[in-house]
Every structure is written in C-alpha cells, then in structure tokens.
Image (cartoon, grey):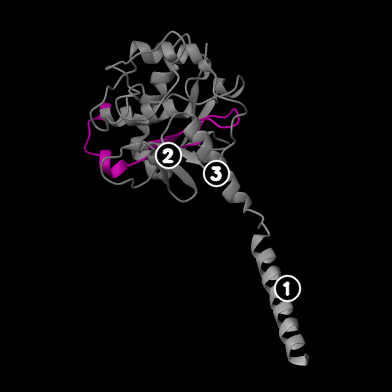
Amino acid sequence: MNKNLKNFTFIALAAIMIASCSKTKETPVNPDPQTQKSDKVIAYIESLGFPASAIVDNGDHYVVEEDIIFSKNMVIPAGQPKTEQFYTGSLVNATNKRNIRVKVDPSMTSMNAEVTSAVNQWNGIAASTVRFSIVTTGTYDILIKDENLGNGVCGQGTFPSGGAAGNLIKINKAYIAANSFAQRQRTITHELGHNISLRHTNWSSIGEGTATPVPGVGGTDAASLMNGGQCNSGATVLSAKDIQATVALYP
C-alpha cells in the first residue's frame, strides 16, 4: 500500500509540473514595439498596392521597386487612401507645400546645378501650389545625399509622412556621374516627385501591384518623367500628364 501511495504521489507531482510548464509556454510575450510599428508600415505599403514580394527590408527602412523608401518609423496616414491622394494616402499639407526646403548634403554639392534644375522643373508648374526652395543652413525638409545603391539604381526617394514632404533622397552619384546633365537632373526630379507623393506612372507594366489614378489624369504616359525602371534612359522633362497630376493634387 505504501509503495502504491508513493507511486500515486509521484504521478500527481509530475502532472502538476507538466501543467505548470505548459501554462508558462502559453503565456503571451509582449511584442516588441518596434516590431509592431514595422508590421504596420508593411501593412501600409501593401495597402498602396505594392505586393509583399516587392518589399525589401533595408535596416531602418523598407525599399520598394528599387527607388521608393519607407521609414520604419514613418507616420501611417489615418484611414484608407483617397482617390485624390494619388496612391499613397498622404500629401504634403497646405502649410508645408508652399515652401519645401531642400538641403544638399556636402556629398552632393558637385551636382548643385542638377539639383537646381530639378527644383526649377517643379516650381515651373504655375498652376500648382507646390514650391521647393534650396537652403544651405538651418532647418530643411528634404536632404539630398550621395549613397552607393549598387548597379541599376540611380536614386531613391521617400513619400510624404505626417503632412511633411518625404524627407530623404539618396542619389547613386558615382553610378550616374557619366550620364548626361539632363539625365542626372532627371534622377533628382523623379525622386522629388516621390517626395510629394507621386508614384510611378507605369506602375502596372513594371509589376507594382495596384494603384489609384489621379482623378482625370489616368492611363499610361510614355513621356512621363515619373515612369519607373528607366534609370539612365527616361524622360528628362515633366510631361503634360505629370503637370496635370501635380496640379490635381496641389491646386
């Protein structure tokens, strides 16, 4: 009887220990806040129509279609993208759009003329309220810097966040150095377009998933400077539809 009692006691203790271990394993662990934020950014990128397969994790940001950057700390726009917001659901707000300050990093000063030409293209859209200015000191909204992005990528830009213009442009200066002046400024002009919310005009043909057209300015446009996948070979001036889209977004 004593032996049986001992066996029963051992079995009971073992069952309690197993139950305790199981309970411990099932207790949820609080998720890392940064991981939660990153997951929300991924969900936002996918909501814009970019397929998950196109999202590349690059440290503190994600890259889509080689030249569009999403910071993992970006402000996620509330609600779903609206038609008039041209794909991204986020525009530069009424105050900031009238003076978007661009600073040229020391690594890019050899292309000051190209930056000036790019800024002048956007400022030349008379019916649009978007205006860029180049600053050398003090506060700025967009930093243009040199970075080695590898072969095939001329530059990268960011979309607007929290009412401000996308705050960064990376230019693969060594890669585009041998290009013509027109093509070098084209790269900068194109990335500035991303900074104010414009997506690639040819999004469908280059496999970017889905996108919402600007009201009244839909369809493809072979002459668009905002066409993607044309590093070193794209249009060097804003097309009529590029201008119409900008005016529609920022009348």
Sequence-first disc among 3 and 2: 3
- Which residue is pictured at 47% across the width and 8% down the height? 127
Nearer the observer, 159 or 134 = 159
Residue 16: which numbered mark, if any? 1
Residue 124 location, x and y as percent? 41, 14
First to last magenta residue range: 156-182
User: Which amino acid type is shown beneath numbered disc 2?
Assistant: Ala
The CA distance from mark 1 to mark 3 is 38 Å
Sequence-first disc among 2 and 1: 1
Residue 36 location, x and y as percent? 60, 47
Give the quadrant of the N terminus: bottom right
The residue wearing badge 3 is 39
User: Which amino acid type is shown beneath numbered disc 3?
Assistant: Asp
The CA distance from mark 3 to mark 2 is 12 Å
The residue wearing badge 2 is 52
Residue 198: which numbered mark, if any? none
- Which residue is pictured at 56% across the width and 39% down the height? 74
